[in-house]
Image (cartoon, rainbow, N blue to C red):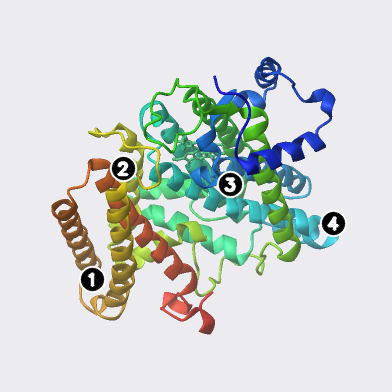
Amino acid sequence: MARDTTSDPLGNILSRIYRSIVPRSIIPKTDADRRRTILEFLVLHMRPVRVRRSTLRFTHTFGLGGMSLVLIGLLMASGILLMLAYDPSPEHAYQSILSIQDGMIFGATVRAVHHWSANILVAAALFHLLRVFFTGAYHGPRRFNWVIGLGLLIGILAANFTGYLLPWDQLSFWAVTICTGMLGYVPVIGEWLQAFARGGTEIGRGTLVLFYSFHTTVVPVVLIVLMAFHFWRVRKARGVVSPNPQDSQEDDDTEKVLTLPHLLVRELAVGLTLVAVVVLLAALFDAPLGAPANPGMSPNPAKAPWYFMGFQELQIHLEPLIAVVVLPVLGALGLVLLPYLHFDHEMSGPWFLSKTGRTTGALAAVVSLVVTPLLILIDEFWLQQVGGAGWLAVGAVAAGITAFAVFLSKKFKPEKAEFVQSLFILFMVAFAILTITGVWFRGPGMALVWPWIGGS
Ligand code: HEM
């Protein structure tokens, strides 16, 4: 078994800081003490006793899973404070937000911490998913944890979306109207789904009570249960995937160091830095609050929250049934089934899997970066003047993707994992461009505009 000494300078500095902060009497002295400490503390129990030294490198995980946990902690703490003063009724909701903002000491800061943590959490969880995907950490013992992670992502989006309505201002009222309106495109059960999501036929008291209950009880409970399950599975898989593919024997204890202090000190450093960043953002920028909700007057443009904006943009170009039902359902199914596909080689560890993976991935990113904006412009200024434009665009996109897939297979003969990764990059970059277009390049009437002369 490896000695608990490390040649990495960052580890030494962090350990020294840890030893100078934590009282000597409670730092475990021997390996056996440390093992016992880990097993005895509920929080430490979520981590394996030893982890591979190579997995400690910041650029291997970017600490994104831990960051998501810290953000959820901040959200729960600030959310409980907000709950003490918020009134979930259409008559008083907006007023109660105003009194939190203007009438309570640190009220605006607590609200801003909640706002920034929530938005950064969506980004952190998405980037964490990308990290796991691009290091192929969804095979073998991590298979089911990928599915639990997807459940967490849906929970995070649900928490954000249900919280979005609570200020009951124009921005939130109309964003929720647009998003729940998209459900109407689901065949057969669309109307029922929409009425269910709205807690009635219109957005009103029923919607606010439903969203408030989900936001403050149902979703947090689901998140806590799924997170406990998620951490337990990481521990069962003996920590995160190793960046070196040759370290495939999970039982090999060489090159391992003790979690306490090496991993925990790093996690603490990342966590505290993140808290500082969120508090600073909250001190500098308040959470937005528009005019009170007015069901009779829609703002122009009326937009979905940024994380659903890609779908709203897609709906402008493609047949709505394809944009907001078929593609999201296929995408979700693909993500759930991904770890259960048959791969000849379960490639995992290094970023982007292999040399071929990096080449085909970069090619997919460049193609998507060039073609997506071009398709948006062609559709906006040419195709949309023709009848049946939505279906024509669906045909053009399907033909483009097929041509790219055939070219990729013939030219590079990639492994299945490399092929799937390239298509994933193609879609992710396209979705990111659609999101950016919707958020910054759409103005009144959802027309294309330059952000500095009329976008939002
Ligand atoms: C609340 C949201 C989440 C939290 C708090 C969380 C937390 C964590 C932590 C702390 C780790 C270990 C360290 C690290 O990789 O940074 C981890 C690993 C992992 N997470 Fe998450 N995660 C979340 C969401 C997700 C999502 C959205 C996915 C993907 C669908 C996912 C899939 C995984 C997998 C497969 C591992 C094991 C990776 C490996 O062994 O290298 N997680 N998660």
Q: CB under 8 Å between callouts 1 and 4?
A: no
Whole-number angstrom distance, CA of label 1 to CA of label 4: 53 Å
Q: CB under 8 Å between callouts 2 and 3?
A: no
Q: For the residue marked with disc 1, what is the amino acid?
A: Ala
Q: CB under 8 Å between callouts 4 and 3?
A: no
Height in image: 181 above or below 255? Answer: below
Q: Which residue is pictured at 16% across the width and 60% down the height?
A: 403
Height in image: 41 above or below 390? Answer: above
Q: Residue 315, can we see it?
A: yes
Q: Which residue is pictured at 61% across the width and 51% down the height?
A: 118
Q: Secondary structure at mark 2?
A: helix
Q: Secondary structure at mark 3?
A: helix
Residue under numbered circle 1: 389
Image quadrant where one finds the N terminus: top right
Q: Position of residue 317 (x, y in %)?
A: 31, 68
The yes-or-no answer for disc 1 within 8 Å of ligand 1 is no
User: Which circle, 3 or 1, is nearer the viewer?
Assistant: 1
Give the camera-side residue of 274 and 340.
Answer: 274
Residue under numbered circle 4: 104
Q: Which residue is pictured at 46% across the width and 33% down the height?
A: 148
The first of marks 2 and 3 along the sequence is 3
Q: Which residue is pictured at 77% across the width and 25% down the height?
A: 27
Q: Is residue 410 left or right of residue 329?
A: left
The first of marks 2 and 1 along the sequence is 2
Residue under numbered circle 2: 334
The first of marks 4 and 2 along the sequence is 4
Q: Which mark is residue 211?
A: 3
Q: For the residue marked with disc 4, what is the amino acid?
A: Met
Q: Residue 199, can we see it?
A: no
